[in-house]
Amino acid sequence: MKKILLNLIVVLLNCYAMLGQTAIKQSTNSAVIPGAERMDVYLPYLKGKSVAVFANPTSMVKNTHLVDTLLKNGIKVVRLFGPEHGFRGDADAGEKVGNQVDAKTGIPIVSLFGAHNKPGKEDLEGVDILIFDIQDVGVRFYTFISSLQYFLEAAIENHKPLLILDRPNPNGFYVDGPVLDMKYKSFVGMQPIPIVYGMTIGEYALMLAGENRLSEKANAINAYNVTTEPTVDTPFHVTVIKCKNYDHNTKYVLPVNPSPNLKQMQSVYMYPSTCFFEGTVMSEGRGTDYPFLIFGHPSLPKNLFSFTPMPNAGAKKSKCFGQVCYGWNVSGSNETVLKKLNGKIQLKYLLDAYKLFPNKDSFFIPAKSGKVEDCFFTKLAGNTELMEQIKSGAPEEFIRESWKPALDAFKVIRKKYLLYKDFE
């Protein structure tokens, strides 16, 4: 049996048959079974163990939260970890969430967002095995994959077995956008990947370990602990519990909103294109019913679509609150929005907004340091070139062509770690 690189062990248990898969699936979840629902596969790993779970409101087993489901099945859950927005998912984007006790279960929650974004040895004391189960949206600056990386590193560094319960990627049917330049690494972009990277969390974890993209300590442990035949009793391994009946052509409709400001599937689809506005003075629709589907600014032409963002449960603070903004409304049915995207990030909204903005010197939010490389837009784009291209009036075709060499190189790496049939 060929040795598995760098000690990341993938157990392809009960792999589904690939024969008879259609090229394009309908936008339905009827046949897709996320890893969390395959309890017959992973419960044997947990029996008699003290378990810690990294989860949020998307961590559902059908209609019941994973933690509640584990407890009902007699699993001893001793610690919970929560990402951005918190374990129960009611915090604003970027809001600091402290450690607390879960009111429903009485289990202590360790917040892994902010200054403490990686479990320490003390956080893992008394824990036998870790679980990661969070619904990602397949976008580089969506911070759950950054949390995944830190959690994976902590598991390896502390020799704790880790179960990754894989879930479908709702944007997993294409790859596009600029690849991050590691000079601009941040929590909204930790790896040299494009904005839309076309991998599930399980596949992404494989790539992190397989390409030595973890911490120096984790990479060193990986390199010297190669195991070829993992079992339930293997003392140190990472196991991905695959989805069934999913591939990278599947248009998976999320059963639970992945975060407070992604309220519709259309927002999930448009997020890679319109999240750029977070780095500008434009409203990206926070404080409305359609974040990332409507966007604009008070100074844009008044013949455009108008809206007034106001504080709400998912956006207590944001730009342009109480001001009439003028801009765009790109909402519609899932099919309409997917047709607009046509399998790629849409730059035209950003380019058009800049062209129409009267005071172009104030379009991008400046960094406190005054340096372009520290701007939030730079962190989102993963480079300084995109901002300069927009300012210079570069056509969209030129911008896309500048992405191509790094995109092509990423696609070669990505292919090595796919667990599911690809879209191309």
Image (cartoon, rainbow, N blue to C red):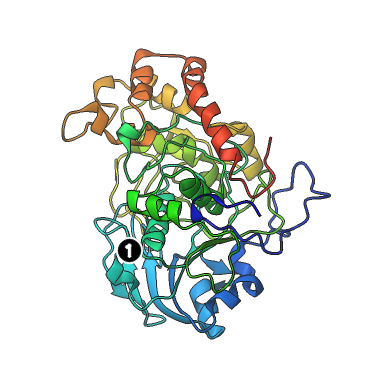
Q: Quadrant of the C terminus?
A: top right
Q: Is residue 346 left or right of residue 114?
A: right
Q: Quadrant of residue 245?
A: bottom right
Q: Is residue 366 left or right of residue 196?
A: left
Residue at the spot 36% in from the left edge and 77% down from the top edge: 102
Q: Is residue 214 above or below residue 154?
A: above
Q: Is residue 263 above or below residue 124?
A: above
Q: Secondary structure at mark 1?
A: loop
Image coords of residue 43 (percent x, y):
59, 76
Q: Quadrant of the N terminus?
A: bottom right
Residue at the spot 32% in from the left edge and 63% down from the top edge: 119
Q: Is residue 166 above or below residue 397?
A: below
Q: Is residue 280 visible?
A: no
Residue found at the far left of this picture:
369
Q: Nearer the viewer, residue 133 or 192?
A: 192
* Count of marks placed on residues: 1
Q: Is residue 173 visible?
A: yes
Image coords of residue 383 (percent x, y):
35, 28
Q: Is residue 121 above or below residue 220?
A: below
Q: Nearer the viewer, residue 126 or 23?
A: 126
Residue found at the far right of this picture:
20
- Callout 1 crowding tier (Cα within 10 Å): few <14, some 14–19, many ≥20: some
Q: State the residue position of label 1.
A: 119
Q: Nearer the viewer, residue 297 or 68?
A: 68
Image coords of residue 336 (percent x, y):
64, 38
Q: Quadrant of residue 361?
A: top left
Image coords of residue 332 (percent x, y):
59, 41
What's the amino acid at mark 1? Pro
Residue at the spot 63% in from the left edge and 59% down from the top edge: 242
